[in-house]
Image (cartoon, rainbow, N blue to C red):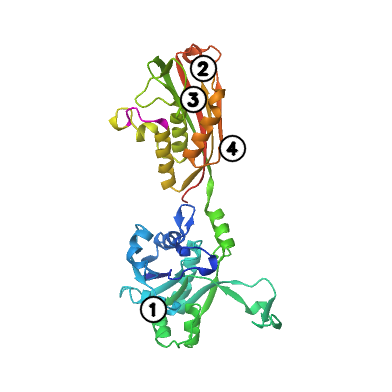
Amino acid sequence: MFVGVIIVAGGRGLRLGSSQPKQLLDLGGRTMLQRSVAAFDVHPRVSEIVVVLPADLEPAGASLIGPTARPCVCVAGGARRQDSVRAGFEQLSAEVDLVLIHDAARPFVDGAVIDRVIDAAREWGAAVPAMAARDTVKRVADDSGIVTATIPRGEVWLAQTPQGFGRGVLAAAMAGSAGDDVTDEAMLVEQSGGTVHVVEGDARNVKITTAADLSAARLAFASAPRVGTGYDLHRLVEGRALVLAGVTVPFERGPLGHSDGDVLCHALTDAVLGAACAGDIGQHFSNVDPRWKDAPGLDLLRRAVAIVREQGWTVSSADVTVILERPRLAPHLDEIRRRLAEVLGVEVDAVGAKGKTNEGVDAVGRGEAIAAHAVAVLTGGAR
């Protein structure tokens, strides 16, 4: 059995109220389209994928989808749903004998639903996943809002995708379809006199249509917050400026280092990278690399934030503690917090900064060194 998947992503999602096509909206670090494609790309019974896009997006299809394990091609859609499905159908290879059609706006579909549809379509020729209605169902006159009938809810099922069809069944349904619009491919088969079987759907396999749907989906795809810690220590020597988060603190000595020795930013950089499991400051900004000679700590922190953002993470808060005997840092902490907040992309009240002494203990306590501890919290992330 050779299973081909047509993912219909040709709409604009006008009911969502977004300025961009809804299939390109972010869900936890990946687009809705990417998540829908991935659900089939990882399924062991899927052989190939065709993605139907709006005509203006089709040339950029490969970059919008990203790399896939299965063969995946893009095609421009048509004015109506059945036109888009037909365009996708024509791109399937000759080996495909079972076709799944899925809405890109259903990014929660899982392997169990896909398996049930494949099995039923293989046995019966046409299958649709659906959920039985739980509430009393009313038929309402469109214009008046008056109830015209109560429909037995046992007869009502809410259809989902993917819908599955033997290749010949779907080809015959498309060939015999009338000019009327259809809302799904099962309707095409029904109109052509074919029989469609229902299999158990999944309550989580929702279609994202409204802004509320999008908010709920983003919440569901958001990973648990990640926490990272960082630590840095430098010897204090004469002839070096004491810089913390870009703030020059008046003092006769400063940290010795390859970069500017900003222990606060270095510790926080490690915390940010560590929370995303993205390595550490030495991996990205080696102290033997001339590019980072005298580099400002705020610049390294800014680069670290960009690295984790590429993975879909966002810094939500941070807390730093600088340990040195003198000078006192209290007069500079507000400006330090402001500069850190600007680089991290958060409000000032999401950044904590403190100065502590080491009570005369060890090199820090003797005034020979400066140290910093940092904690960063990240949210989002690609699941």
Q: In this view, does 326 lie above or below 217?
A: above
Q: Give the residue at mark 2.
A: 327
On the image, which quarter does residue 76 sit in? bottom left
Specify which label sits upstream in the sequence, 2 or 1.
1
Identify the residue under disc 1. Answer: 86
Q: Nearer the viewer, mark 4 or mark 1?
A: 4
Q: Is residue 295 above or below residue 116?
A: above
> Toward the viewer: 328 or 175?
328
| Region rendered in magenta | 292-297
Give the amino acid type for the residue marked by disc 3 in the picture. Ala
Residue 372's label in the rendered image is 3
As measured in the structure, the alpha-carbon distance from the residue carrying label 2 to the one carrying label 1 is 73 Å
Q: Position of residue 22 (x, y in %)?
A: 48, 64
The kind of residue on which mark 1 rests is Arg
Determine the residue positioned at 43% across, 84% down: 173
Numbered disc in front, either 3 or 2 = 2
Q: How far apart are marks 4 and 2 (CA)?
A: 25 Å
284 or 226, nearer to the observer: 284
Total marks in image: 4
In the rendered image, residue 182 lying in the magenta stretch gets the answer no
Between residue 339 and residue 282, name the one nearer to us. 339
